[in-house]
Amino acid sequence: MQDTRFGDFGGVYAPETLMAPLEELEQAWRTLRADAGFQAEMQSLLQHYAGRPTPLTHAERLSDELGCELWLKREDLLHTGAHKLNNALGQCVLAKRMGKTRILAETGAGQHGVATATACAKLGLECVVYMGEVDVARQKPNVLRMELMGARVEVVRHGQRTLKDAINEAMRAWVSDPQAHYVLGSALGPHPFPSIVADFHEVIGREARAQVLDQAGGLPDLAVACVGGGSNAIGLFRGFLADESVALVGVEAGGEGPETGRHAARFSGGTPGVLHGCYTWLLQDADGQIQHTHSVSAGLDYPAVGPEHADLQARGRARYEYATDDEALQAFAALSEREGILPALESSHAVGWVMRERDVLQGKRVVVNLSGRGDKDLGTIMALRGGSAADGADASEVVA
Amino acid sequence: MSASNRLIEATSALRRDGRRGLSPYITAGDGGLDRTCALLHALERAGATCCELGVPFSDPIADGPVLQAAADRALAAGTTVDGIFATVKRFRDEGGSLPIALMSYCNPLGHRGWPEACAQAAAAGVDALILPDLPVEEGAPVRAAAEAAGLCTIFFAAPTSSDARIQSAVEASQGFLYVVGRTGVTGAGTTFDDGAQGFLQRVAGLAGELPTAVGFGIASAADVTAATQHADIAIVGTALVRHIHAAGPDDAAAVSAAESFVRELVAGTGAPSTS
């Protein structure tokens, strides 16, 4: 294998059974990324099926309120409601061209699971999605969407029962069936996954850069994205890596605050180590055991960060901050009420950081990747806020 | 590698004498580390060639439900890497001479730095390292540290491995080559059919002088006999861990159950070899 690391980070820490499938995947990816037919098929699917390009929206009312120029890259408007489809479609087309018929995936918030189920339905592939029991409960609409599109959802009842455990189980399933393709959903895991996933999301940053130049008349001062594993962030960042004037900011889940221990802010409370196939920043205890994480958003509730982010941080090209649960919820409310956009709780973290840092962002042009829409989070939001006219409404007489 | 390494001596002796061997696996700290120490003595008494001592990890991606649960129990009991090293040292101080291969996912050992981890393991009386999420590609720093400390490193061959990959694993391993008998996680049954035997034969050919140990799904003396048709050593993990746990909370009962089960499995190595 080649170029398995980003600086010191990444690598291939995988069981021997998976090494041949990983080598095969790397080979297929290197061949197909340079293949005009593959690129044309992807381009067509992204445009005519997924709905690319997604818009760049000037959030005018919130900009006025914050005193900065806030632009939103609208990945929430991509088919299935999040950026995840870029990668799911890409990997499923790749897998199909490799002759694979069975797809395995993990999911946290359910968006990657929905995107993979969607791609499998579109391409005629069998799909099994592993999802932690806690996430199944808090992202139920996405479970139903996957099932309606013909995917089988395997509920993971081991460990913390969130994304980490879903990845454990998906990797076990892949070790048991190495003929299947494992569609890893974030820019993490063993090489070549971090590179493949970033390649398929690069379109976000490429579009955003052209759009901001066109619509705002210049580059942004900052490009900001939430970071769970880091796929939407790496997609946005890649568009601006060569523009040294653009500060890149990844926003991790601060949960109840890093000082409480109930968070998923790896760069604030972690150290480097090996999890799920790569060497990167982790939340671990003094004995190298992986720690539990907490975030109001299922998609950021994960103890490791993608290795390319670890390298960007080490090189000083990007910096990593956090927003707490409360700050994300405030951002959710602000975008809903001021802009008419219900953002995913994940994406709300990026907006929440901008809102908290408004004083130092005065007059700055900021592009935020609005990685997904918030429909899936309505249950969580309403449970925290309470008080809807829908509460207690009774339609039984009409239905009867 | 120093000629005095217990594992190399034990597995070379198998070859020299034309015998087959058994390598039982236990999860360190499952039932407490006092029990672990007593179990190591029991495995030695029962005639094991060597043993694999598992370091519990929070996220064991190559393990099935039985070994996941064992790791959870060990961690819940407060098992640490330092505690495991102290247990191995105690076993040696009490006269234990069974070769011990420490089986750990990368992070619990790598977290303290490979040179430190290897030096501490060797000082405690560990003989080898087996790291299920460390392929040969990432092995260089571990191999250097292990060699400096006098520890064997043991890499894997799987049914999906090409001859070239198996060759690299053989070159990077001492003591034995770990052969994954089938695709999948630990615990589910393995059938030693013609396909599996053909794979074991292919690996044995590539391993040459290096003894081979086959694991995954071996649960009975008959399995041991079948597994060692084309391999030097049979590894029994899940079945033993389940057996010990089923014996209940009394350490003496658990140790006695382990000893009699391992004796029974060792008897399976006495079958005539056809390789």
Image: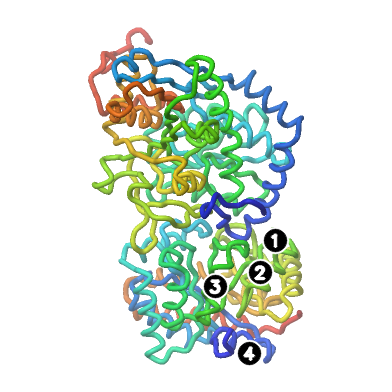
Circle 3 is placed at which residue position?
A: B236
What residue is pinned by disc 1?
Answer: B161
The residue pinned by badge 4 equals: B13
Residue B257, image x and y in percent? 43, 78
Q: What element carries label 2?
A: helix
C-alpha span from label 2 to label 1: 10 Å
| Residue in view at x 46 percent, y 28 percent | A371
Residue tagged 2:
B169
Against A25, residue A394 (above or below) is above
State which mark lies toward you, 1 or 3: 1
Question: Which amino acid type is shown beneath numbered disc 1?
Answer: Ser
* Residue type, numbered disc 3: Val
Residue B196, relative to residue A3: is it above or below? below
In the image: residue A55, left or right of residue A227? right
Q: Are marks 2 and 1 in contact (CB under 8 Å)?
A: yes
Instruction: Name the residue rendered at 40%, 81% in the picture.
Output: B88
Side (left or right) of A145 relative to A41: left
Q: Nearer the N terminus, badge 3 or badge 4?
A: 4
A194 and B92: which is toward the camera: A194
